[in-house]
Image (spheres, rainbow, N blue to C red):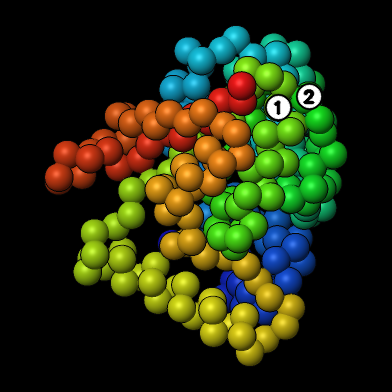
Amino acid sequence: MFTPQGPTLRELAVQALSSTMRGYDLLAPKFDLTPYRTPARVLDAVADAVRPLGPFDRGLDVCCGTGAGVGVLRGLCRERVTGVDFSAGMLDVASAAHLRAGGGPPVDWIRADARALPFRAAFDLALSFGAFGHFLPDERPVLFRQVYDALRPGGVFAFPVGAPPPVGSRAYWSLLGFDLAMRVRNTVWRPPFVMYYRTFPLAGVVDDLVRTGFTVRLLPLEVLGRRRDGSPRARLVVAGRG
C-alpha cells in the first residue's frame, strides 16, 4: 500500500497516537505518497461532472489537505480559489505544490476548522474530498451549515461518495475492523484521533443536507464503473443553496 518513500510504520504509529491535527501535521510531508490521497481518476470524474453545473467564479476546497481538490477548482473557477484546512503542515505542502504548478486563478490558503469557517456568502462552488471520516455523525449538521453559509445563493456544494462494500466482503470486514480499532484507541488513549470509514452513510448525509436547507441531487460517476448489481461504484452529491 505504501511506497518506499512513504511514511514508515513507526511514523504512522506516532501519527495514530497523536491528535487528529498533530497527526496530519506529522504526515503532511509524505501524505501524497500514501494511499490516502484521492486518486486522480476520482478527481477527474468529479471535475467532469461538476463542470456543466457552472460557470463558477470563486471556489472553496473544504478540508483541502495537500490541495488535490484545489487543483480541481483551479480548472473550474475563473476568479479565485480558497483551500481551508486545520493542519498547518498540510497547508504548507499544498501551498508549495501549487506555487510550483502555476496556472489557473490565484489561491488563498486559510487555516481554520471546517466547523467554524470564516466565510459568509463568498463562494459559488465548494468541493471536498476524503475528509468526512474526520467528523462524527452529530457534527455533520454544523459542518453542512458552515458550508451553506459560505456559499452565495445559487452556490453548489459537491463531493463524491463511494458505495459501501458488500456485506461480508473483504473490504467490508477491513473497514469494520479499522473503525472498531479506532473506537478502542479513542476510548483508551487521549487525545482522540478521529478517522472512521463507516460514519458517513449516504441516506443520513442527504437527510442532514436537506435539513440544512440544501436541495440535493445524486449523480452517478459513470466513469468509475458499476457494481455487479448495476448500482454505481460512486455518486456525486450535488447540494445547491437556494
Q: Residue 90, image x and y in percent?
A: 74, 50
Numbered tag placed on residue 122 in the rendering: 2
Q: Nearer the viewer, residue 235 or 4?
A: 235
Numbered tag placed on residue 151 in the rendering: 1
The image quarter containing residue 16 is bottom right
What residue is shown at x 72% (from left), y 21% (from top)? 152
Check disc 1: other Cα within 10 Å, few if <14, some if 14-19, many if 20+. Answer: many
Check disc 2: other Cα within 10 Å, few if <14, some if 14-19, many if 20+. Answer: some
Horizontal side of 14 relative to 164 (left or right) equals right
What residue is shown at x 56% (from left), y 25% (from top)? 240
Q: Residue 9, image x and y in percent?
A: 57, 76
Query: Dots 1 and 2: beta carbons under 8 Å?
Result: yes
User: Disc 1 on helix, strand or loop?
Assistant: strand
Q: Inspect the image, locate mark 1, and give the three-letter code of the amino acid beneath it.
A: Leu
Q: Nearer the viewer, residue 30 or 127?
A: 127
The image quarter containing residue 27 is bottom right
Q: Residue 38, image x and y in percent?
A: 51, 44
Horizontal side of 32 relative to 85 (left or right) equals left
Horizontal side of 82 relative to 221 (left or right) equals right
Screen quadrant of the N terminus: bottom left
**Rendered view: 148 above or below 197:** above
Residue farthest to the bottom? Answer: 188
Q: Disc 1 and disc 2: Cα gap in Å? A: 6 Å
Of mark 1 and mark 2, the one earlier in the sequence is 2
